[in-house]
Amino acid sequence: MSILYKKVWRLLNPLDKKSAKKVYPVITYKYGVAMDLKQIAKKISRLSGVSEGVVNSVLKDFRTELKEELLLGRSVNIDGLGFFYLAARSKGADTAETFTANDITGLRVCFRANKEIRITANGSTRSEGLSLKDVDRINDELPTEGGGPSSPDGGIVENPLG
């Protein structure tokens, strides 16, 4: 199994636009096809012996219940999988006293995997069968739109944020 990555330049200190830049990997899904709920249900059905329709229904019910619990202010810990929780976004305030709920601009759902499913990419603890492939070095093997992620300055994609 291969994980595809591209290279991007990032500032060492994002708050200082004059700080040095380094190249970092970013996992890319551009060349793959995402699994959808129906495909996952089909695979689980084959593994468990439960019908695809039942699995699909349970996964949809899980999604509904997960959202409801998060909106009630609870984190959700699924043994062997991980826990889901909400994180808030804001522009920040100068003092704690001036910060109000109106300063929160959004919420996002976060997930932290349990150790049973964490994927490791270093040395002797690398997940079995995992290989990392630089999309710039395998562009000829992959279907691309507009020539792939390479840039004219040596194949490193600039970070659009920095």
Image: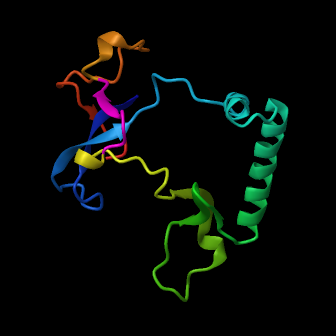
Task: Decide which of 150, 114 is in the foreground and name it.
Answer: 114
Where residue 132 appears, as percent x and y from the top left, is: 31, 32
Which of the 4 quarters of the picture holds residue 53? top right
Where residue 46 appears, as percent x and y from the top left, is: 70, 29
Which of the 4 quarters of the picture holds residue 42? top right
What's drawn in magenta, residue-wise? 126-135
Where residue 43 appears, as percent x and y from the top left, is: 67, 30
- Magenta stretch: includes residue 134: yes
Quadrant location, the N terminus: top left
Identify the residue at image location x=61%, y=64%: 86
Main secondary structure found in the magenta portion? loop
Image: 11 above or below 37: below
Image: 3 above or below 79: above
Identify the residue at image location x=31%, y=24%: 135
Which residue is farthest bottom? 97
Identify the residue at image location x=35%, y=34%: 130
Where residue 65 appears, as percent x and y from the top left, is: 79, 57
Task: Decide which of 162, 5 is in the foreground and name it.
Answer: 5
